[in-house]
Amino acid sequence: MLKLFTCCLSPHCQEQQQQAHSVSITTTERSFFEDIIGSKGGLFRIFRLAELKDATDNFRSRNILGRGAFGEVFKGVLTDGTQVAVKKLSVQSHQGKRQFRTEVTLLSTLRHVNLVRLLGCCAEQSERLLVYEYHLNGSLDQTLFKTGSKNLGWPLRREIIIGAAKGLQYLHEDSRHHIIHRDIKASNILLDEKFHARISDFGLARLLDMSQTHLSTGVAGTFGYLAPEYASSGNLTDKADVYSFGIVMLEVVSGRKNYNPNVRPEDQLLLKVAWRLYTQGKLLDLVDRRMGDQYVPWEAARILHVALLCTQAAQSLRPSMSKVVYLLHGRSEISEVPTKPPSVFVESFEMQPHKPQSRKRPSVTLTSSSNASMVSSIFSET
């Protein structure tokens, strides 16, 4: 049972509280944690701050696994030798506190082989920390793009794509909640020691009632992965995740980031290059050259075809994630033909091209910094 301490307003009293390592949580949070612990029992732990400081060597910089908009992730080793990843959320960030509650709520109830497992959390003093299982091979973007990283062979790339697709299908269609992740990208797909894919970072996720067709919300996510209709209007459906996953599939097959400012302007956007090669009948030219001829052409062509189906400008034309999984597993010819590429962004948004100033931009929460020229190019294409 968590013990609730009365918050004192005087500086001296606050200092005494910190020295005593008291748990500073609200009445609402106390009830929230009791509900989680009561429902999950031994599957979910409340960690002490001192325990996590010891595990991470007091959150030393050399133990940092990654950084996000709302905090840092540290590698830690518990007293029993268990390796963990500890996300230390920004105490100054309202978004960080919201992310903490969202992740605890969702990941304490979700169980799937292709989702990251949340082991527990810590809410002590002003700190909010999340403790996950540790993934030896880090994130997909590190494996694909980091200089000097080991090149992924084709079988692993294919299985990573299929595994992540199954995890997303579970969120959309098979879990007890209808969950839209909102930030599907290569850095949010983790790889274990056998390179099995695990979807992570649910701080921006939203639940959709069965009776709802969409949510209207402030735009959140990462430029380059945002679906055009969501970026323009804030109308959110699970097809926004499908679009983002299409971008991830292109990155995995090509070994290229979705945006590269260091190449010719016409080649900077990976999605734009993919659609151009498709119209030229040269889609396999997108395959990562580091693999040489050590890949299966028909499998690569199939995955790229599905990726283009997922990134069509009209959300109604994008397949569901269960259809994506089915298509990725299949051997028969795909009958669906990709149409309406997202290079016609403005028209596909059903906006008035001659009166762009009459439409307000939705508020945007980005999970990483973005390049201004990239944003400009995305929203100015016709």
Image: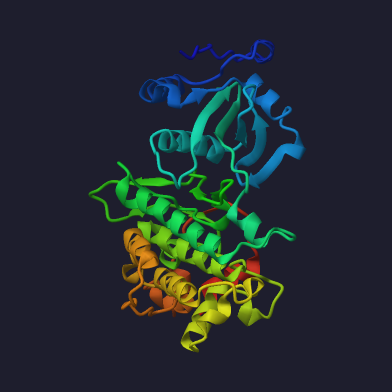
Residue at horizontal 25 percent and vertical 48 percent from the top: 210
Residue at horizontal 55 percent and vertical 65 percent from the top: 252
Give the percent coordinates (x, y) of residue 206.
40, 46
Residue 5 against residue 150 in the figure, above or below: above
Give the percent coordinates (x, y) of residue 324.
37, 64
Asked which colour scheme the image uses, the reply is: rainbow
Give the percent coordinates (x, y) of residue 66.
66, 45
How many marks can you see? 0
- Mark yes or no: residue 231 visible: no
Give the percent coordinates (x, y) of residue 22.
60, 14
Q: Residue 359 falls in which quadrant of the image?
A: bottom left
Residue at horizontal 47 percent and vertical 62 percent from the top: 244
Work out whether residue 213 or residue 255 is closer to the camera in this orientation and state it: 255
Residue farthest bottom in this picture: 280
Q: Residue 43 falls in which quadrant of the image?
A: top left
The quarter of the picture where the N terminus appears is top left
Residue 158 against residue 338 in the figure, above or below: above
Work out whether residue 10 or residue 367 is closer to the camera in this orientation and state it: 367
Residue at horizontal 55 percent and vertical 24 percent from the top: 123
24 left or right of 35 in image:
right
- Mark yes or no: residue 235 visible: yes
